[in-house]
Image (cartoon, helix red, strand yellow):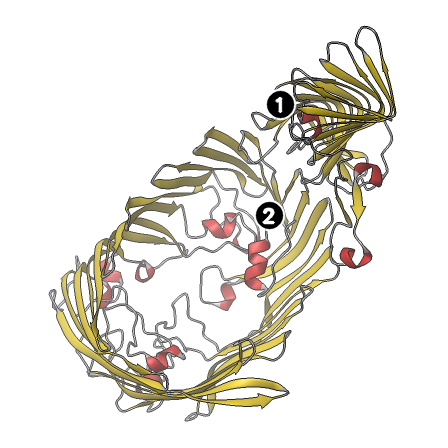
């Protein structure tokens, strides 16, 4: 065995990695498939493979020659070497050449006298730590970026790709040509799919490749053909077609083919023609841009002459144009100041019900219109905006149309005064407007105009490790200037209101150490009292711009505000009392169990409602069927429902939570929820939930409103995701309306994820409420949704992962 060391220009690196790193397309050679070990494939051990989708990985073996101090130096190891008088060299017998990170192994290597190239024959292997190339013949230039390998097999270690080519040729600086080649991400010996092409050119400098006569084969059966194909080699964006989206439902085929346009490094656009068999051609698009201090996007879609669709909503918009637009821009105006601009609009309230592009996501509350700028200082927070919404309901009554704020200016501040004392300032000035017929809405909703709201606050919080007390008073001062348009009214058009909102919140904390079940715990016992007083104030002349009466909850026990917004201040004279206990694990500090109970005692009726009248109570439901059936009782009861809650981490896998609002006067449940959760380390998830809510529980809705339900709501919700194996996930959900004895949603699916492809099949049936409150208007919709991904190439179908995460709590779908 002899060794010789030469110095030449660096060997072309790209054939062993730089050329092929990131390549996503190669071509099929005529040679037989190599065994897995010849492709540097290392199987996992039985224990390692148990929880892995891929049963092995590509690993480059150790270099056979040591690294040189000078990366340009060429190291050679050979068993035999012959030299001619002209300076030619023939190396034979397990020849190894190394320069830098590139190592060439071959049976024979010929080096001409000019030392400008090397020719290798026999079973050769070229590696550089990122890729492997095997072949039978190779010619590599030592002075420029050219070379070729015949009958090649290659592996990209990090990308987990392998392929074959009759000939792999480097034609220039980071430019390559492959003839009759293929590539796949499947493990050696398992060609589930491969992409095959006759003439493939790779331009790594620009980050893209092209292929002629490319075809996709599944189990060696051609299933798709491209006369010409352009594809990316890395993460750089390139103009071209993206993977399509395909959806199937009971009466519909939905196919979308996006085209990506890389306008500039900071500008791009996507144009998406979408064919929906029962509606027609929908042309959609999105434009995005990124500037130094701002960013934005414009998206929209247009369908001319809707064919009417199918299902329960069929023919509702037949022969009408359907469209939407949503433009956004946001940026920084300074180190503490930002701004936002947005304009959204849709042709009708059910556009996204009919054309929502994401799985299970058909509902949007509204399309926002916004121009806003803010400032966030240490003391002051300022906000100025013009804002409105197009509410997406159809039909949409005038009463349900939201108000525009044109404009709205807010200034808030907080000061710490020392010794626990503090003061706050809340202020807002807004002009409210909406386009309605003033004669067709309730009088208190007919006005438009301006509102100025000033709310100084003083308070103090005295806190010790064993407890706290916090008195607080807010002084709400509100003034209006109103216009009732064509509506004749005797109401004051410049009403004002001043009212004080006072509260005292106090709590104690008792602690002890204890042992349960062989574990040490830190238990707390936390009694709490909260007194709130808000005097009755006549607000009949005040409009109803942004206020709604809040439904009772655990949070309402400790809040003096019965209404959201500032148009209504609910009178209140009540004392809330509660007790909470928590069990904290000593070793980790995690909460094992939390349980609490609380109730409010009322010393006066609550007379102020949405109508602002402080002298009368709500009508009794037996005398007026158009009022909320619970409103009179809620206003006159002398104590709230008893609120209890429980959160219990039973063990590492099981947990439960419950909340119960129980009326001890009527001996009935007003609202309850119970959840049982199972989480397994292997990824299994099971959720069982129960919900009950009395009719009229939310005081802000009345019969006839879209959100009102004329029955007590009782629902069961079962969802699961079961990791049957590292490759297979089974998912399902069943949501049942016990009151009306009907399923609200049924979902069943399977996700298969292998080393080289992923498949997701989901069947779903759900109830569409048709934007009304009446069960008689509901209809069922259903669909079969398919998504598949070929790892390293792309896929098609709707991405449902975000929907699964939302409806199956605790489930994190593995990436396809």
One can see residue 562 in this view: yes
Element type at mark 1: loop
Image check: 15 left or right of 561?
Answer: right
Q: Which residue is drawn at the image coordinates 32% and 74% (left, top)?
A: 549
Depicted 414 relative to depicted 23: above or below:
below
Q: In the image, residue 370 lies at what x, y percent?
A: 30, 49
Residue 695 to residue 774: above or below? below
Please rate how many residues cluster around mark 1, counting C-alpha atoms within 10 Å: few if below 14, some from 14 to 19, many from 20: many
For residue 681, above or below residue 629 = above
The N terminus, quarter of image:
top right
Mark 2 secondary-structure assignment: loop
Q: Which residue is the site of mark 1?
A: 174
Q: Which mark is residue 633?
A: none
Instruction: Select label 1 or label 2 by which is in front.
Output: 1
Sooner in the amino-acid sequence: mark 1 or mark 2: 1
| Image coordinates for residue 705, horizontal then vertical, percent | 38, 67
Residue 29, can we see it?
A: no
Q: Is residue 647 left or right of residue 628?
A: right
Nearer the observer, 709 or 656: 656
Snapshot quadrant of residue 444: bottom left
Residue contact between numbered discs 1 and 2, judged by CB atoms under 8 Å:
no
Q: Quadrant of residue 190?
A: top right
Which residue is more in the foreground, 658 or 396? 658
Question: Mark 2 = which residue?
Answer: 798
User: Which percent across, then down, holds residue 335?
Assistant: 28, 48
The percent coordinates of residue 112 (x first, y second) are: 78, 11
Which residue is pictured at 65% across the width and 28% down the height?
A: 71
């Amino acid at each position: 065995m002899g060794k010789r060391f030469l110095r030449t220009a660096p060997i072309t690196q790209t054939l062993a990695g730089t050329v092929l790193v990131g390549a996503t397309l190669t071509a099929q050679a005529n040679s037989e498939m190599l065994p897995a070990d010849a492709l540097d494939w290392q199987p996992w051990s039985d224990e390692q493979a148990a929880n892995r989708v891929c049963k092995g990985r590509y690993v480059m073996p150790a270099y056979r020659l040591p690294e040189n101090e000078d990366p340009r130096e060429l190291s050679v190891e050979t068993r035999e070497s012959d030299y001619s008088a002209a300076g030619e060299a023939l190396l034979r017998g397990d020849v190894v050449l190394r320069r830098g990170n590139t190592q060439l192994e071959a049976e024979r290597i010929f080096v001409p006298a000019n030392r400008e190239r090397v020719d290798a024959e026999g079973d050769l292997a070229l590696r550089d730590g990122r890729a492997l190339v095997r072949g039978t013949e190779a010619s590599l230039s030592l002075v420029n970026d050219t070379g070729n390998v015949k009958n090649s097999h290659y592996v990209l270690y990090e990308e987990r790709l392998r392929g074959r080519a009759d000939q792999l040729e480097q034609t220039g600086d980071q430019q390559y040509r492959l003839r009759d080649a293929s590539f796949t991400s499947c493990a050696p010996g398992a060609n589930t799919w491969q992409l095959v092409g006759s003439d493939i050119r790779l331009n790594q400098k620009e980050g893209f490749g092209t292929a002629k006569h490319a075809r996709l084969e599944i189990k060696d059966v051609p299933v798709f053909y491209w006369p010409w194909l352009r594809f990316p080699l890395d993460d750089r964006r390139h103009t071209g077609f993206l993977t399509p989206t395909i959806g199937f439902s009971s009466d519909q085929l939905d196919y979308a083919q996006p085209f990506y346009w890389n306008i500039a490094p900071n500008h791009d656009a996507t144009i998406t023609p979408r064919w929906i068999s029962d509606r027609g051609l929908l042309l959609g698009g999105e434009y995005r841009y990124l500037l130094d201090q701002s960013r934005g996007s414009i998206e929209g879609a247009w369908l001319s002459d809707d064919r009417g669709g199918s299902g329960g909503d069929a023919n509702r918009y037949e022969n009408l144009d359907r469209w939407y637009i949503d433009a956004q821009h946001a940026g920084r105006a300074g180190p503490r100041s930002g701004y936002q601009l947005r304009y959204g609009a849709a042709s009708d309230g059910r556009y996204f019900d009919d054309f929502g592009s994401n799985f299970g996501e058909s509902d949007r509350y509204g399309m926002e219109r916004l121009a806003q700028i803010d400032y966030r200082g240490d003391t002051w927070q300022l906000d100025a905006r013009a804002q409105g919404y197009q509410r997406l309901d159809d039909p949409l009554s005038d009463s349900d149309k939201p108000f525009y704020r044109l404009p709205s200016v807010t200034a808030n501040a907080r000061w710490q005064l020392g010794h626990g004392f503090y003061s706050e300032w809340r202020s807002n000035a807004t002009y409210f407007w909406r386009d309605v017929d003033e004669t067709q809405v309730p009088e208190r909703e007919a006005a438009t105009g301006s509102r100025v709201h000033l709310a100084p606050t003083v308070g103090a919080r005295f806190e010790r490790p064993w407890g706290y007390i916090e008195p607080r008073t807010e002084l709400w001062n509100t003034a209006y200037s109103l216009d009732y348009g064509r509506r004749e009214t005797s109401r004051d058009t410049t009403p004002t209101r001043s009212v004080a909102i006072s509260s005292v919140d106090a709590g104690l904390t008792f602690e002890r150490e204890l042992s349960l079940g062989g574990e040490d715990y830190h238990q707390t016992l936390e009694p709490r009292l909260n007194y709130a007083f808000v005097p009755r104030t006549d607000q009949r002349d005040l409009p109803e711009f942004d206020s709604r009466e809040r439904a009772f909850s655990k949070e309402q026990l400790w809040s003096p505000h019965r209404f959201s917004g500032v148009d209504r201040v609910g009178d209140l004279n009540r004392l809330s009392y509660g007790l909470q206990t928590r069990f904290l694990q000593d070793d980790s500090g995690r909460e094992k169990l939390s349980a609490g109970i609380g109730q409010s005692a009322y010393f006066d009726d609550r007379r102020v409602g949405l109508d602002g009248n402080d002298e009368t109570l709500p009508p009794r439901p037996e005398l007026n069927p158009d009022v909320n059936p619970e409103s009179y009782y809620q206003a006159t009861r002398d104590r709230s429902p008893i609120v209890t809650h429980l959160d219990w981490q039973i063990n590492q896998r099981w947990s439960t939570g419950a909340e119960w609002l129980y009326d001890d006067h009527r001996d009935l449940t007003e609202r309850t929820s119970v959840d049982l959760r199972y989480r397994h380390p292997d990824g299994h998830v099971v959720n069982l939930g129960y919900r009950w809510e009395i009719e009229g529980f939310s005081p802000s809705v009345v019969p006839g409103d879209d959100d009102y339900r004329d029955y007590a709501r009782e629902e069961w919700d079962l969802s699961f995701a079961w990791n049957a194996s590292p490759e297979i996930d089974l998912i399902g959900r069943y949501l049942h309306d016990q009151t009306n004895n009907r399923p609200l949603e049924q979902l069943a699916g399977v996700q298969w994820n292998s080393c080289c492809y992923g498949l997701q099949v989901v069947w779903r049936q759900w109830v569409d409420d048709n934007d009304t409150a009446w069960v008689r208007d509901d209809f069922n919709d259903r669909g079969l949704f398919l998504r598949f991904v070929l790892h390293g190439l792309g896929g098609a179908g709707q991405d449902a992962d975000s929907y699964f995460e939302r409806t199956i709590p605790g489930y994190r779908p593995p990436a396809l």
